[in-house]
Image (tube, rainbow, N blue to C red):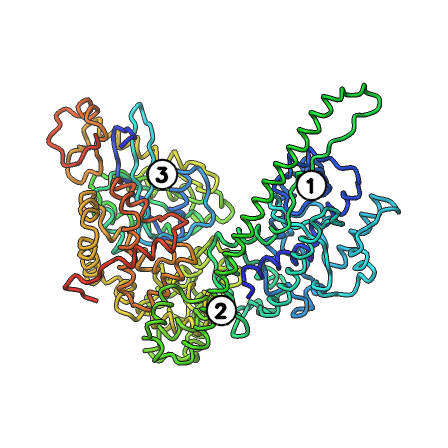
Amino acid sequence: MTEKYDFLFKFLVIGSAGSGKSCLLHQFIEKKFKGDSSHTIGVEFGSKIATIGGKSVKLQIWDTAGQERFRSVTRSYYRGAAGALLVYDIANRESYNSLSEWLADARSLASPNIVILLAGNKKDLEAERQVTFLEASQFAQENELMYLETSAKSGENVEEAFLKCCKTILGKIQNGELDPDRIGSGIQFGDSKTRLLNQEKPKKPDCFCNM
Amino acid sequence: MKTLASAENDNTADGEVASGREIDHPGRQSENEVTKPIPAQATCEGLIFCNSQLASSFSEVKCNRARAKAGQYLHKVLLGKLRSQSVPSLENDVQPDIEDAGMSDDIVYGSEENSKEDWYKTWPDCIDKEKMKVGLKEGENSSVDDNIDKICANPNTPRSLKDIHLPLAYSPITKGLHLIRSAPQPNTNGFANVESSKKIDDKASLPELPENIDNSCSSPSDSDSNDRTKRRLIPGILSRSVFSWRVRDQEIWSLFGRSESEERRSLRSGPGTVGTTGLIQLERPAWLPAKPSVEHQAHSNQHSKILTSNRKKELKEAKLRQKLLQMQLKEEEEASQAARIWLHEIFPKWPSSREQKRTQEMWWRGIPPCVRGKIWKLAISNDLNLTHDLYVICLSRAKERLSAAGSTHSIDQSVENDDNDRVHSMELIKLDISRTFPHLCIFQKKGPYYDMLHSVLAAYVCYRPDVGYVQGMSFIAAILILNMDAPDAFVCFANLLNRPLHRAFFALDQKTMDAYYNTYSCLLKENLPNLYKHLQECNLSPDLYLLDWVYTVFAKATHLDLACRLWDVFLRDGEQFIFKAAIGVLKMFEHDLMTMDFLSGSKFLTRLPDDLSAAKLFKCISGVKMNVGKNIF
């Protein structure tokens, strides 16, 4: 292992089919818009190391299939996720309507403290908008989600969305709300040194460390 | 025996000429008898077939254009290439209406168009304008190319492109063809040879191609010429192995790998090439003091040394090219031989010939694309006894539903639940079609196969509403459509999906799926114990990567040529081959995978490298053992 990082977060990207999950991921990692991507079957993976507040965090991103019918398969991927991007398409009402189902899945199957950011994607399609900013932000507030409107095409708010999530998770670790050592927290230490600095009393690891 | 790949190249030539895009440059510039050998050499090293004149003209063109229309130049050439790939439509004999019936470039390229005067609606039109241009630029004394003159003499007569002998040179830089006025260098012979062979190719290949690629069942816009124009835009990768099934029985083509075509492109323009190495030693101008004789001697020695070394290099390269060409010809010969055997010996005596050792062996090596569809159809068989009529019925029912849903859907959300579900399916199908083989650009809206794929999937949803549409199906249907007609594809599709493995997966029957995963794990443990242990330690469970491979039978994970070969054997050996191939892939990359952790391993396996070598993979697959007791297959 040559790369060094302090934490590794398991991160999900979920939402209805065609809302732009894979494109968001691609934009975040490659900083490019991939117009001709094919639909995800099952799950695809991405990773990126981000530095937030002096800590380097490696994101292990699970980009899941969006079709309703695949729910039973994708549910098995949720276990132990520390964060999630819940994506809908602002130009597609249906994708917004199904948010609560996705949310229920994420809350019940991932770690209970999972940090979720609601991303209204395809912000560039302003003319075809079907879901207003206000409406979605109210939904976010009611469900204690962070909220951003993003555009995988222009890149607007894409990095911010991922980083904002990370920042919140890091904050929760630091104030003790999240315990990285708990099984299924979705968080692993990248380095034993930070482990000692960060946590008061490191118990024996349930997670494997990359030293 | 000529190949489809070469046919494609030749059509590129036709397309370039027909669209009249680039022919002005050399024609215009080569009037300059003054050569500029050195800059030409520097900038146009890759220009094949060119003499220094052409090279210099090319470099000038490049410089001139560079500022004004930086990207446009290349853009047009590339677009020109793209357009020329609309293989079936460019043969005038077959479709005489192309030139007159408003196949105007504006339709296709309209959005990128800035300077309309460079674009021509028809071939005679282009020649007209071309002549005007040449005339304007070079005055009366200009010896416009004889050929152009000939064509110009009667600009309004639509003519077969085959009749027009244009001296063309392929430039790998622009990926386009350039007209050259004459070939004054000693390489004229070689040039002429290639030219004439191209002509032969044209004659041999073009009439074989289908008249109209659009035979989809539900294209409402058939009469719309815009649509038809766009449907003809088919990128090169396709015409190689995809269209071949339409070639029917008349001729047999062979299959070539993705990279081979590019090679071929350069090879074909290869023999007889003398590059841009004409280094001319000029006399010292009279107004300068003469060189001392020693110096003069030294310089001319240097000059000749450079020339000889260049010549040697070129000779060597030419030999290499020759060798490659011969190798390829041999391969082609073998492939066409195989196709002949498939078509005339195996196919007619199907059920009995299937089990023959030779058939099985040849099957493993890959079915030639021209017979692939037929053999697949036989191999899949029709246990469900589906008829083409059923397809038509399902399709019309699907259309009815869709149009009915379209009008009521938004108003009345609480229709029947089942019906609503189907509408969702239909909407998702539309979304997914353009996301199926996106790089091929044929399944996108207005692409040639969009309607066909939509029809097959929609008909299936009506045929099996209980299964409905599940993502992944579009890839299976697409692979079938690329090899057979829509009704046949539907029948094969429904039968394939009725096999136990796919039935379980597409019904998302988790229990059965787990059983399959377990069996696969056992096989993996048996075949690659170390890797199995490593992956277990990483928590990388098979379902993460296997799901995609099963759902699409590697159509999404590998490139099209390889996917078709895997499908060949999948249809020979049945569904167990998917697992065998999966272990083959793991075996092929065992060494790499052993060094990877969960993240890099899963990333790697869910997105395999684009350039998987078929030969290597099949070698790995052949070594996989499938006999681990409790096999549920």
Query: Farthest residue toward the left?
Result: A204
Vertical arrangement, residue B242 with respect to residue B72, above or below: below
- Mark 1 is surrounded, within 10 Å at the Cα level, by few (under 14), some (14 to 19) or many (20 or more) other residues, namely many
Vertical arrangement, residue B217 with respect to residue B83, above or below: below
Q: Which sits in the foreground, B128 or B567?
A: B567
Is residue A94 in view?
no
Give the amino acid at mark 2: Trp
Marks 2/3: CA–CA distance: 51 Å
Q: Which sits in the foreground, B28 or B486?
A: B28
Check whether the beta carbons of the residues at disc 1 and disc 3 lie within 8 A of each other. Answer: no
Give the amino acid at mark 1: Ala
- The N terminus of chain A lies in which quarter of the figure? top left
Tag nearer the camera, 1 or 3: 1
- The C terminus of chain A lies in which quarter of the figure? top left
Marks 1/2: CA–CA distance: 41 Å
Is residue A43 in view?
yes
Label 1 vs 2, first from the N-terminus:
1
Vertical arrangement, residue B504 with respect to residue B617, above or below: below
Per the image, the residue denoted by label 3 is: A147
At which x and y percent is residue B577? 29, 63
At which x and y percent is residue B280? 72, 34
